[in-house]
Image (cartoon, rainbow, N blue to C red):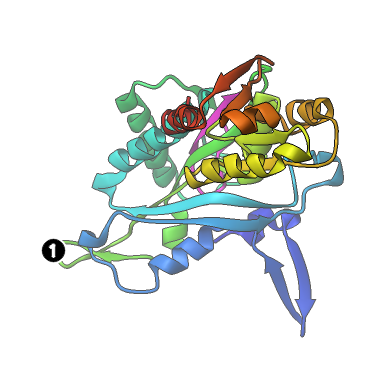
Amino acid sequence: SGHWDHYKDNMYSTVIDDEEYCIKPMNCPGGVLVYASQPRSYRDLPIRAGEIGTVHRHEMRGALHGLFRVRCFNQDDAHLFVRPDQLTDEIVGVVRLIDSVYQQFGFKYHVELSTRPDDSMGSDEDWEAAENGLKTALAELGMDYELNEGDGAFYGPKIDFHLEDSLGRTWQCGTVQLDFQMPLNFGLEFVDHDGSKKRPIMLHRVCFGSVERFIGILIEHYAGKFPVWLAPTQVKVLCVSEKSRDYAHQVAAQLEEAGIRVAVDDRDAKIGYKIREARSIDRVPYMIVVGEKEAEEGNIAVRDRSNETHPFETADFIAKVCEEIRTRA
């Protein structure tokens, strides 16, 4: 794959019985082996093999930074094997996929096209064809991009997506990388319509990049106040006293049955303390406060992030939250 020659300083290795072993820093060779596991026809292509793959990279201690730069992380990796005539359409499809993911979270982003680095593998012709393939796809999308000379992967050029968070900071996450080299190095082939053997082109793509880094970006972007559809706990039910504890669990059961992620705080603590904790530490979108009055009347008092409290029928509140989840408001 070329990783040993170009990346070994960032790999964890050990010697067992006089043989050198490494923990994988990339998922790409595994995708190659999936393709090579059986003969392929032009009718089989494109093949899109996706995984959540764990990788290990020996980052310098000074470069480590919370969830943003770690030594072990998970990638939403996919490797696409395509015919040359499918290349532009597949790149366009991946870019649209990445755009749809970022739009869902409300992120602004800019795009960079990174070209051949000094320590590259492959011929001038392959690199020119690869760079032109990415430029053609970006032109078809009508997408503006910045040229980042010499910052491509050692095996091919790439399109990088740089997210902008709520504080104006940028983070490189998604990428589409075009690769002629790995199919060549591993001898990958497919049988074309005329019976001749051809070599597929490989595309590497991630949307989130590092799942851990993306979670870190989301926490920073929303300051922990996730929208309802994304929040780990969407509603927290707080009982005022022991007398309303059973009713609090009844309400929570109704929400849970509707598919809402709910937690109950039935501790023997003051309601003001529970509210402050739910608002400032848990940062839940909605708190339901139930006391003896709500238990007797069969309704609920809902407190939102504006700290305003509104009376609700339980069924009406469930419908409201479900609609916010459905529309990802």
So how many labels did they put on this image?
1
Could you tell whether 27 is left or right of 7 in the image? Answer: left
Could you tell whether 134 is left or right of 208 in the image? Answer: left
Residue 25, how many percent across, how many down?
Answer: 65, 57
Q: Please tell me in which quadrant of the rendered image residue 294 appears.
A: top right
Residue 163: in magenta span: yes
Query: 22 and 285: which one is in front?
Result: 285
Residue 187: in magenta span: no
Query: 327 and 309: which one is in front?
Result: 309
* Label 1: few (<14), some (14–19) or many (≥20) C-alpha neighbours in 10 Å: few
Q: Please tell me in which quadrant of the rendered image residue 216 appears.
A: top right
Residue 265, how many percent across, how many down?
Answer: 74, 40
Query: 40 and 304: which one is in front?
Result: 304
**Residue at position x 46%, y 68% from top?**
33
Q: Please tell me in which quadrant of the rendered image residue 222 appears.
A: top right
**Does residue 118 appear in this view?**
no
Question: Please, what is the three-letter code of the amino acid marked with disc 1?
Answer: Asp
Could you tell whether 76 is left or right of 11 in the image? Answer: left
**Does residue 321 appear in this view?**
yes
Could you tell whether 116 is left or right of 286 in the image? Answer: left
Above or below, 124 against 136 in this view is below
Residue 160, how many percent across, how many down?
Answer: 53, 33
Q: Which residue is mark 1?
A: 194
Residue 274, how many percent across, how many down?
Answer: 79, 31
SS category of the residue bearing label 1: loop
Quadrant housing the N terminus = bottom right
**Residue at position x 34%, y 35% from top?**
92
**Residue at position x 85%, y 36% from top?**
269
Q: Which residues are magenta?
A: 149-164
